[in-house]
Image (tube, rainbow, N blue to C red):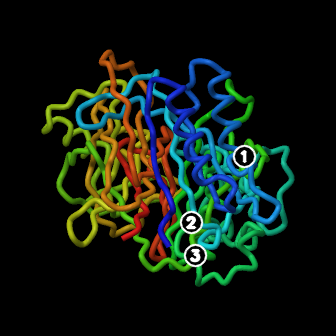
Amino acid sequence: MPPLHLSTIITRTPSTLHGHIASLSSRYGGQGHTVLFALSSNFGEPNDLQKAVNTLTKFNDKSSSSTTKGRVIGCLADSFTSTSHDGNAFDANSVSCSIGIFDSRSCIPFHSTLQGRQQPQVGRWHSFRNKTEEASSNEPDWQEVENASAIDWENIWKQSKSSVSSSLPHELRSTELSQIRSLLSFSSPHPDKFTHVLAQNFPSSSALTLVASPTHFITGREVTLFMDGQIYGEGAVGLALVEDEKLSCATEFAGVNRLSGPMTITSQEGNMINELNSSNPTRLLIDALGLARISPQDNEQFALGVVDTNGQISRTYRITAGDPSSRGGSISLDAPTAPEVGTIVQFLHFPANSSVEVPGSPTPTVAFLTTPEPCGASTSSTPDLMLENMFTVTSTRGFVLSSKRTDPWTCSLPGGVAKVQWK
């Protein structure tokens, strides 16, 4: 069944946001419902942030003894800075809150303790733990194999995925897997193990994970996740949506421009593309920039986009490094593994200092949106915005999506949007 309520409020006035939360709590609180929220972390006054957190985490506290208390899941998220709506850009003083109210019979809250991987060094094979950490018996010794030759990296990656296949959140283990149609979650950075567990166990379902806002200087945690009064600084929290045939999942790429014609990946290794059309990929990118008359600036973003059978971009892989004279011009991607040989791709460009348009929808929609790092506040007076039927959350770190038996894919290119919609 569709959510009982979805809304996103963006306002420069914290009291307006507090009033919206209080109104929803008065209407839906204490009735045994499950609440999903994402609250921006950019409040000017700590007391305003604390007040909003308290109201949200205690949303169901007024339940009577004869009523199931209900559940609350949420996170601190990035702000809507670097986004716009109908031509109005939001500035750094705009705070936001997205709230979803679900019938508790239609969803299962869950918490995962799986930690994210260490961020790989550019152009090197990935080390998933510190040397001081003890290797598990069912996982390869990444430090030993990092510099070895003739390694079957595809097999190594499969070993890593299979080693966590039994790590499904315990709340989901007693559920008939075929009943789960979609999973929504918030996580700490690089949630590869967690997202692969979801993809392996729910191959016919969509699984959408937002990487939450960094909160080191706000709460002292890498991220701040909430579930039923508990606060977590790592792992993931989320909702599994059950027995709803009307759910669909789609992606869009707002403000992203194509730089080249279609090309075929002819050589790849790990997270690196070694050849495109049997040619130097970095040189091809430089040539494409020249044809487009683009002089890259500090905040320019470039990516490879996977082209589907309809000629549309289905996935994006942000380019993190490339040198036309080093390693044959290989380019590194912000991903654990690059697309397979034979994949049709195009170069993409997200211009510097661009804003991302906040999407709307006439039907109930959960939308996760990748945004650029803020590079300057808008000087315009932004009006308050209330998006009805929309649960919209932004992340500068991106989101991870798997659906229709595809491996999880991370969208860290600004402009990427993933939507779960009720028809």
| Residue wearing tag 1 | 234
Q: Mark 1: which amino acid? A: Glu
Task: Determine whether, in the image, residue 16 is placed left or right of residue 275.
Answer: right
Q: Closer to the camera, 35 or 239?
A: 35
Q: Nearer the viewer, residue 387 or 218?
A: 387
Q: Earlier in the sequence, mark 3 or mark 1?
A: 1
Query: Which residue is identified by label 3?
Result: 242
| Residue at 62% across, 24% down | 48
In front: mark 3 or mark 2? Answer: 3
| Cα–Cα span, label 3 and label 2 | 9 Å
CB atoms at circles 3 and 2 under 8 Å apart? no
Q: CA distance from mark 1 to mark 2?
A: 18 Å
52 up-or-down from 310: above or below:
above
Mark 3 or mark 2, which has the lower sequence index? 2
Q: Residue at x 50, y 77 (%)?
A: 244
Q: Position of residue 36 (x, y in %)?
A: 60, 53
Q: Residue 275 or 93: which is nearer the viewer?
A: 93
Residue 361: x %, y % from top left: 32, 55
Looking at the rendered image, the disc whose residue lies closer to the viewer, 1 or 2, is 2
Whether label 1 touches label 2, CB < 8 Å: no
Q: Amino acid at mark 3?
A: Val
**Distance from label 3 to label 1 (Cα)?**
25 Å
